[in-house]
C-alpha cells in the first residue's frame, strides 16, 4: 500500500533502507575505516564504507564513506579516494558505538 503513493513511497523506502542498514539482513555499516581528510594536518575521521563501486556515477578509484555524527542519528557521506582509506580491523558495532559516543566509549 505504501509503495503506491509517490511521496509516501519515497519516504517509506528511504526509512526501510535506513533501518535495514542498521539491523536488516543487508547491513551496510560493516566496513569501518579511518579516512585521511586533510593531507597537510593529517586529520583523520572514522567512517564506514557504504559503496565501493561508484561506476554508475561515472566515478572510479573512489568509494562512498558515511561519517556518522556523534550523539545523533545523522551523518555525512563523502566520496573519498581509495588511497586515503585505512581499513580498521575492529568489530563494526564497537566502532559505531565509539563514533556515536564521541570517543567516550572504549573499544
Image (cartoon, rainbow, N blue to C red):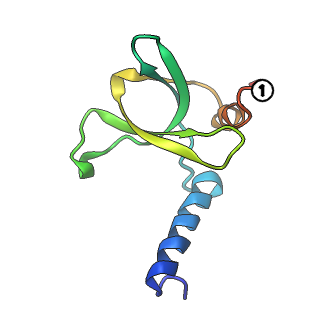
- In the picture, measured across the screen, residue 40 lies left or right of residue 12, that is left
- Residue found at the very far right of the displayed protein: 105
Up the image or down, 4 lies above or below 72; here it is below
The residue beneath circle 1 is 104
Q: Residue at x 63, y 52 (%)?
A: 22
Q: Percent position (x, y) of residue 33?
A: 52, 28
x and y percent of residue 89 in the render?
58, 24
Please state which of residues 102 and 53 is positioned toward the viewer in this rendering: 102
Against 10, residue 6 (above or below) is below
Q: Secondary structure at mark 1?
A: loop
Horizontal and vertical percent position of residue 105: 78, 28
Nearer to us in this view, 91 or 60: 60
Residue placed at 55% from the left, 88% from the top? 1
Of 39 and 1, which appears nearest the observer? 39
Which quadrant of the view contains residue 82?
Answer: top left
| x and y percentages locating residue 97 in the rendered image | 72, 36
10 Å crowding of disc 1: few (<14), some (14-19), many (20+)? few
- At 45% from the left and 20% from the top, the residue drawn is 36
The image quarter in which residue 38 lies = top left
Identity of the residue drawn at 55% across and 24% down: 88
Up the image or down, 31 lies above or below 84; here it is below
Amino acid at each position: 500500500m505504501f509503495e503506491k503513493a509517490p511521496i509516501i513511497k519515497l519516504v517509506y523506502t528511504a526509512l526501510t533502507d535506513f533501518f535495514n542498514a542498521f539491523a536488516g539482513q543487508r547491513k551496510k555499516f560493516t566496513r569501518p575505516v579511518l579516512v585521511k581528510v586533510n593531507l597537510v594536518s593529517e586529520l583523520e575521521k572514522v567512517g564506514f564504507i557504504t559503496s565501493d563501486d561508484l561506476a554508475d556515477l561515472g566515478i572510479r578509484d573512489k568509494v562512498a564513506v558515511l561519517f556518522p555524527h556523534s550523539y545523533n542519528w545523522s551523518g555525512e557521506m563523502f566520496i573519498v579516494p581509495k588511497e586515503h582509506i585505512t581499513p580498521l580491523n575492529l568489530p563494526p558495532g564497537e566502532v559505531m558505538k565509539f563514533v556515536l559516543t564521541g570517543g567516550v566509549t572504549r573499544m
